[in-house]
Image (tube, rainbow, N blue to C red):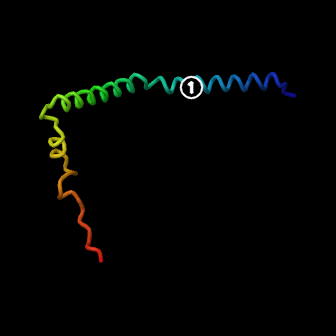
Amino acid sequence: MVSSRDLLGDTLSALQTAIDNLVKAVTDGLGQLLSSASDVVSGLADLLTSTLLGDNALSATGLTEASPAATPTATPSLPPTG
């Protein structure tokens, strides 16, 4: 017969292993995640700075002109209704 103490010990051991594996999985990619997040924040800061300071290279019209989705040819034509 299995004692409740053995069952509790096995359960706690399994829980500790699961937590250790979860922490390892989360922290393994942490350096890459922080680097990517830093790059994104830096890019956003550069964009905001250039926009607020009036840099013409990244003005709002410059961004829409560079986007092919913003051109009239990129919008689909719909058949007439009625």
Q: Residue visible at 17% across and 53% down?
A: 71
Disc 1 element: helix
The answer to whether 48 appears left or right of 22 in the picture is: left
Q: Residue furthest toward the left?
A: 56
Where is residue 54 shown, x and y percent of the image?
15, 31
Instruction: From the viewer's side, name the closer residue of 16 and 74.
Output: 74
Q: Type of residue at label 1?
A: Asn
Q: Residue visible at 77% across and 24% down?
A: 8
Q: Residue visible at 19% across and 32% down?
A: 51
Instruction: From the viewer's side, name the closer residue of 76 and 81.
Output: 81
Tell me: residue 19, above or below residue 79. above
Instruction: From the viewer's side, name the closer residue of 24 and 40.
Output: 40
Q: Quadrant of the C terminus?
A: bottom left
Q: Residue visible at 15% across and 43% down?
A: 61
Where is residue 22 shown, x and y percent of the image?
55, 27
Where is residue 65 shown, x and y percent of the image?
15, 46
Give the quarter of the image for residue 38. top left
Q: Quadrant of the N terminus?
A: top right
The answer to whether 28 appears left or right of 76 in the picture is: right
Where is residue 39 shown, x and y percent of the image?
30, 27
Q: Residue furthest toward the bottom?
A: 82
Give the quarter of the image for residue 49. top left
Can you identify the residue that label 1 sits on? 21
Disc 1: CA contacts within 10 A as few (<14), some (14-19) or many (>=20): few
Tell me: residue 8, above or below residue 64. above
